[in-house]
Image (cartoon, helix red, strand yellow):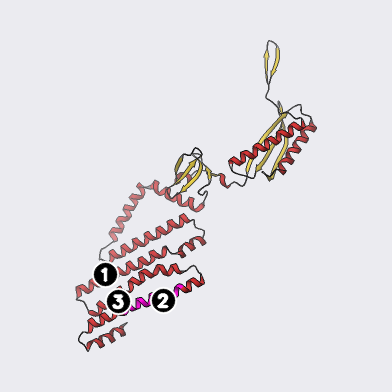
Amino acid sequence: MGEIKTWLLAAAAQTGLARPVAALAVFLLFLLLRGFLTRFVFGLASKIASRKKTAIDISFFLALEPPLKSFIPVLGIYIALNIWLLPPPWSLYLIILFRILVVLFAAWALYNLTESRPFKVIGQNIGLDPLLADFLIKAIKAIIVALAVIMIVQQLGYDINGFIAGLGLGGLAVALAAKDALANIFAGIVIIADKPFSVGDWISTPEVEGTVERVSFRSTRIRTFAQALVTVPNAILANEAVTNWSRMGKRRVSFNLKVALSTPREKLARSTERIRKMLQTDPAVHPETILVHLVEFGESSLEVVVYFFTRTTVYAEFLAAREAINLKIMEILEEEGVSLALPAHSIHLAGEQEEHP
């Protein structure tokens, strides 16, 4: 660049307009460079990126193109004005202005890069939740803007040490005043990262039960089965036991079948065996754990435990499957002549005993 400047000055000195002509020539040279960069460099880079289909694709170059195209003429103007040799006060202002513009263009480029596809691909590769990735991108953007403002203020000659110290004290006061809001935000980050539930899941907590409609960084919205919308702060959800019914692999059914004490042993054995085989062949029953056994001699009945799991976890389908199985059990008991035990109460009246079912 120094050799170009010397050559231009020497060529223009012969006409008596050395510095203005050299300045204009440098400015025109940078305009040509801008056109060359736009047409050839970015065009070639975009073709290479589209052919290789890498993470650093065309969006990366598209993010850098606007700030770089705008910066090249600014750089040309700055060098041209330096060649022109402005008076001392204006030359100092020019340096400060150029530094500020450099900060702005750099912040512009970094800001655009955060919205490019490579950032999203990186988030997907490391398994970040889209909501958490969006939050991190917004945080990075805020940091870029804050750093740009601080650097510009420094270039203007202001001492920001006291300002930063004040921000620290002010931030502490704000943090103490908004500790509940901050607790909800951090709890929201934990919920989004751990994913104990997702939108559309059926969950229950000690406070509420329903379907998750929205998860944000401050709160979670749950639609109850009565169609009421409940907004729960994330700090509460993070500190409570949350049961996610939508992620059950199977749903348990367990009850004691009470039959009459007078039931013959052979009939009871055949009934339990038939119920067990019926559950093993029923398509709605999960085959992993099926238990049907006589477990207890009660005061007024023989108790047979029936324990199994349904394949479905949807509550309505679960109830339908359980009803169908109960009807099949009743049919088996009727065919085997086994009656269910009914609770009996004994009432003593004037020395005689009467039993009422």
Q: Is 296 located above or below residue 178 in the figure?
A: above
Question: Which of these two is toward me, 287 or 322?
Answer: 322
Tell me the element at label 3. Answer: helix
Percent coordinates x, y for residue 19 in the rendering = 23, 82
Q: Which badge, 1 or 2, is on the more N-terminal residue?
A: 2
Q: Which residues are magenta?
A: 29-46
> What residue do we see at 29% from left, 68% from top?
100
Q: Is 268 located above or below residue 96 in the figure?
A: above
Classified by dominant secondary structure, the portion drawn in magenta counts as helix
Q: Say few, some or many: other residues with alpha carbon within 10 Å of mark 3 (under 14 / 14 to 19 / 20 or more).
A: many
Percent coordinates x, y for residue 39 in the rendering = 39, 76
How far, Cα to Cα, is label 1 from label 2? 28 Å
How far, Cα to Cα, is label 3 from label 2? 19 Å
Callout 2, which amino acid?
Answer: Val
Residue 303 badge = none
The answer to whether 71 appears left or right of 323 in the picture is: left
Q: Say few, some or many: other residues with alpha carbon within 10 Å of mark 1 (under 14 / 14 to 19 / 20 or more).
A: some
Q: Is residue 238 visible?
A: no
> Is 61 a magenta residue?
no
Tell me the element at label 2. Answer: helix
How far, Cα to Cα, is label 3 from label 1? 14 Å
In this view, the mark in front (3 or 1)? 3
In this view, the mark in front (1 or 2)? 2
Circle 3 sits on which residue? Answer: 76
Callout 3, which amino acid?
Answer: Gly
